[in-house]
Image: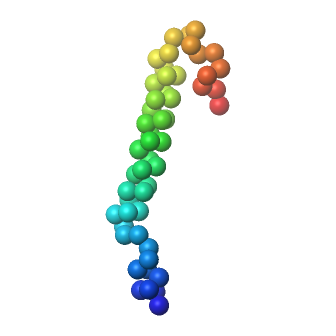
Amino acid sequence: MWQAILSYLPSGMAWVCAFLSWLIPYGIYRINKKLHQLGDPPWKKEDTYRE
């Protein structure tokens, strides 16, 4: 019974790739946001990056 159910699930590598497809863009987004907070000139820091 369990083998029939488990045969429909994706492989472990598919789970890893799915997780990385979320983690890598999110990580780049966070790094980019931090770089803008540290490097943008004061006239560009109005209300752009407030949380």
Q: Residue at x 36, y 67 (%)?
A: 12
The residue most toward the front is 8
Q: Residue at the location (38% across, 63% down)?
A: 14
| 9 versus 30 height, above or below | below
**Outermost residue to the bottom:** 1
Is residue 39 depicted above or below 6 in this figure?
above
Question: Where's residue 7, x and y in %?
Answer: 40, 80
Q: Quadrant of the C terminus?
A: top right
Considering only vertical position in the picture, is 14 above or below 47?
below
Q: Residue at x 59, y 16 (%)?
A: 45
Relative to 16, say whether 38 is above or below: above
Q: How many marks?
A: 0
Residue drawn at point x = 40 percent, y = 51 percent = 20
Taking the image as shown, residue 17 lies to the left or right of residue 50, namely: left
**Which image quadrant for residue 31?**
top left
Asked which colour scheme the image uses, the reply is rainbow
* Residue occupying the far left of the picture: 13
**Residue 28, position as x, y percentages in the image:** 43, 36
The answer to which of 31 and 4 lies nearer the viewer is 4
Residue 22 image point, x, y percent:
46, 49
- Where's residue 17, x and y in %? 37, 56
Instruction: Pick out the residue farthest to the top.
Output: 43
